[in-house]
Structures are given as structure tokens and as C-alpha cells.
Image (cartoon, rainbow, N blue to C red):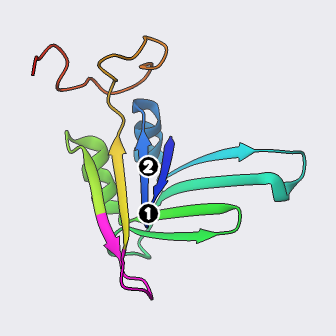
Amino acid sequence: MKLRLQFNSIRLRLKRGEVERFASTGRVEEYICSGSDLAQVFSYVLEATDAVSSPTAAVSPGSVVVQVPPAEAVKWALTDQVGIEGEQATDNQVGLRISIEKDFACIDGTDEQNVDTFPNPLAGKSC
């Protein structure tokens, strides 16, 4: 699972196996370890839960947790739907944009970079 953070937005991109795992378990989690103790571990999680009615995210020291409603998660995981998007209200004037997407193969990427990705709908097309 890839995580991208950019001006008040969170974007997760999942490969095929991760989408399959998410569909069957309702949860996918990744870690970044920069040292040997727990304070040096950063986790990012995508989970389906009845506790939310639209995509939400919680950012805290050491983690980002993105939650989506189960029905929306299943529809996305089991169909050709590319992504789930939402915007979470914040205390400032700019909402937090949340995007969960299927990871497509890079057209100019190597076979190694494209392992377990979804076929790119633009592959073989010219501009």
C-alpha cells in the first residue's frame, strides 16, 4: 500500500493482493520502521468499519488511520470502481481530502515496479 500526504490530503493506493486482503478482512496495514523502538515506527491503516458513514481519517503521532463504510469498501474492492473519495471537515477552512485508489501499472514502469498492480487502462494507447 502506498501512502501519499500532500497539502491536507491523504491518498492510499493498493495493489491487487492488498485489495483482495482488504475485501476479505476489512483491514490493510503497513509500517515504516526507522529504528529499533516503537517510537520509531509509523503505521498507516485502511479499515472498513460501521463506525463511519463516509471516508474519514485520523492522524496521530506515529500513525494514519483511514476508515470507510463496509458497503462502500466492498463495492470498490469487488468491482471496476477505481477509487473512493471523500472530504472530512476540519477546524480550519480547508477540509481533509481522502482518496483510496487501486494501483495501476505504470506505463513506463519496469516489470518489478508493476508486480501485482491492476492493468493500466491507458496501456497501448497513444496521446
Q: Report helix, strand or loop for mark 2.
A: strand
On the image, the x and y values in percent for residue 29 come to 59, 49
On the image, the x and y values in percent for residue 74 come to 31, 52
Indicate which disc residue 121 carries: none
Q: Report helix, strand or loop for mark 1.
A: loop
Q: Quadrant of residue 125?
A: top left
Amino acid type at image mark 1 = Phe
Q: Is residue 124 left or right of residue 36?
A: left
Report the mark closest to the observer, 1 or 2: 1
Amino acid type at image mark 2 = Leu
Q: Nearer the viewer, residue 47 or 30?
A: 30
Q: Nearer the viewer, residue 39 or 76?
A: 39
First reached walking from the N terminus: tag 1 or tag 2:
1
Q: Residue furthest bottom?
A: 91
Mark 1 residue crowding within 10 angstroms, few (<14) / some (14–19) / many (20+): few
* Residue at 83% in and 59% down: 39
Q: Is residue 6 left or right of residue 60?
A: left
Q: Quadrant of the C terminus?
A: top left
On the image, the x and y values in percent for residue 13 come to 41, 43
Q: Where are the magenta residues, as a range?
A: 86-95
* Residue at 28% in and 60% down: 85
The correct choice, above or below, for 81 with respect to 93 in the image is above
Q: Quadrant of residue 109?
A: top left
On the image, the x and y values in percent for residue 20 come to 41, 37
Write down the residue under mark 2. 12
* Residue at 36% in and 85% down: 93
Write down the residue under mark 1. 7
Q: Quadrant of residue 67?
A: bottom left
Does the magenta run of residues contain 88? yes
Quote the CA–CA distance across marks 1 and 2: 15 Å
Q: Nearer the viewer, residue 20 or 124?
A: 124
